[in-house]
Amino acid sequence: MISIFKKKPKTGYTRSFAKRLTWRIMLRMLIIMGIPTFLVFWMGYGIVYTGATIVSNRIVKGEYEEIRRITSDLYVASVNNAPVIEDCLDQPDKMVGIMERMLKNNPYMRSCGLSFVENYYPQKGRWFCPFAVRVDSATIETHVLGDAKQDYLKEAWFKQALARNEGSWGRGYIDTINHDTPMISYTLPIHDKRDSIVAILGVDLSLEWLNDKVQLNNRSRRKIDNDSTGVHADKEEKWTANYSVYYFMVDSTGTFLLHPDQNRLLKEKLQTHVGEDPDSTAKDILGLHTGNDDEFMLDEEKAYISYKPVKYTDWSLALVIPSLIVEIFGYLIGGFMILMILFGLLVVYFFGRRVIKKASQPIKQLAESANEVAKGNFTTQLPPLKSHDEIHLLRDSFEQMQLSLTSYVEELKTTTSQKASLESELKIAHGIQMAMLPKTFPPYPERSDIDIFGQLTPAKAVGGDLFDFYIHDEKLFFCIGDVSGKGVPASLVMAVTRFLFRNVSAHESEPHLIARALNDSLSESNEMNMFVTLFVGVLDLATGHLDYCNAGHDSPLLIGQGVAPLPCDPNLPVGVMPDWQFTLQQVTLAPQTTIFLYTDGLNEAENILHAQFGDDRIISLAETLLNRGQNKPSTIIQLMTDAVHDFVGQAEQSDDLTMLAIQYKR
């Protein structure tokens, strides 16, 4: 007998902790191996079905990509050769050569033809259709089709292609000219210099070739040698599912385009093989949806099916796996899991006591580790424990204390470092934001007809207010705005708005159209629902005529012969609603008139009693300055700044403060 069955000397403890724990584990394992065994079996069965879904989706996607690559090559060949054909319309004898060259350069193409409209080339007759067909991998034949027997002018496909006037994949058909081959064609209209349709270019894909390429067993159609002379005869085999995996592809009408039974190609529909009342899965397939069904009845057999539509066509590709195959794998996996659990039970029985006994010895090591932690060595390794009893609870308590102390020290270091880094980054961001705004005043010292001064004071390191101006074609383009919110998000929207203003106004001189363009751009993908109140103005420096549009912003003040708010229509802020029709307003400024623009950081500034600075106080102060003759832009803004600071006192600035003053002096 091995040592684990030997009797041990008795100690002062009547019961062994290791033995007690071993029997408890064994008892629980026996319970787990009882009733839940059935659940484990079906879990394995479910895993197989889940795996079948994942694998089948990947397989279908792989074959889908192959079909897409083939159809894409034919599409590209058509589109690339259309200009060549259109350039040679005055040389009909070159058309056969172009068809032959297309076929040589595209190995997936079975044939191609160029069907001209009636009497396009009078010398060629009523019909003219240069045509090239691939006889085998090394031989290409060319023909000129078209006569009373082959009157393509009356064919439905030709009339439909003319009516569509665009490239498209048509319905499948049997090519009676080329050995009754099932085919499908991509047609593309050819236009002359007057953009009139003169011909239909058709490139043909052999469904028989594509079917052999797609089917997993590649045995949908066999060619068997009948004798030693090398003469071949086609031997049609009656197809049966035979527990094999296969593909089929149908168009939106349900007609089979691919199937291992070639007798179904273009002759039968999916609906006839799923019962008199097709289920929702068949409708999904014909409706060009993507999905899976593990109980799909096809040809009176239950099957697992995964389907996916082929892009840019009305085709749907499906992979069929007989349910019996999936069920067999499910039973095997479930049985294997049961055997593994039984084996695990035996391992626990023979080795559990030894492992548990070893795992119950770390008390001394835990005491030594606790002493090291008490000395300040927070990274001391505690003994690993696998038991879940009071010893483990004690060890977890020490470990939690150890981790908490270590985490606290690390967090303190990280917080200090991050705070310093954030302050540095915000300082840089503030510098970048200020650099985007005009900062040289006076901006146009060489001009005597205009004087401008502006100032922005963000509530945080970075803000959402903006102002900008520049002169183009003797017109002053200017704006002032306030982004909803504060901080970094508002500063990003501010930067975008300023960039859009510069970009749009460089090509558009109407303020309401500038506001509309900014609104459409900012409304797009505005998931954060941020908006900008904006005032846009265009001042003709020669005449003093001012065109302006106010998008939800505070009305500016006109300081000239008196002080009065500039009349403004109630437009929405930009970024709120796309396609909003902003209104244009106009006014002519008298010489020495100053336009004073500001954001709500001025009139809504609050003191410690939460009283606001207010519009009345702004107007009163402007009138005082006008009476004193102090209507210079820099003087107005400086005195407004001093006044609002005196009013606010010790209260914290709650919003960005921006002011812009423009004096028309001519």
Image (tube, rainbow, N blue to C red):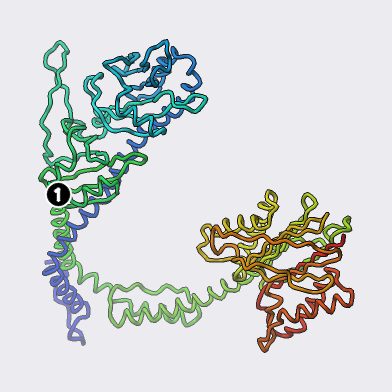
Above or below, comparing residue 436 to residue 652 in the picture: above
Residue 546 figure quarter: bottom right
Residue 543 appears left or right of 517: right
The image shows a total of numbered marks equal to 1
Residue farthest bottom in this picture: 609
User: Dividing the image into 4 quarters, which one contains the C terminus?
Assistant: bottom right
Above or below, comparing residue 90 to residue 241 in the picture: above
Residue 600 figure quarter: bottom right
User: Dividing the image into 4 quarters, which one contains the N terminus?
Assistant: bottom left
What is the crowding at mark 1: few (fewer than 14 residues within 10 Å), some, or many (at least 20)?
few
User: Which residue is depicted at the point 65% across and 55% down?
Assistant: 514
Picture coordinates of residue 442, whole percent (x, y): 84, 62
Residue 508 appears left or right of 22: right
Picture coordinates of residue 359, whole percent (x, y): 28, 73
Above or below, comparing residue 148 to residue 284 in the picture: above
Above or below, comparing residue 346 to residue 224 in the picture: below
In terms of depth relative to the viewer, which is nearer, 547 or 654? 547
Three-letter amino acid code at the position of disc 1: Asp
Using the rendered image of the protein, determine whether residue 527 is visible from the camera's viewpoint: yes
In terms of depth relative to the viewer, which is nearer, 432 or 317? 317
Picture coordinates of residue 611, whole percent (x, y): 68, 86
Using the rendered image of the protein, determine whether residue 432 is visible from the camera's viewpoint: no
Q: What element does badge 1 sit on? A: loop
Residue that numbered label 1 is attached to: 277
Picture coordinates of residue 207, whole percent (x, y): 26, 30
Residue 356 appears left or right of 605: left
In terms of depth relative to the viewer, which is nearer, 665 or 503? 665
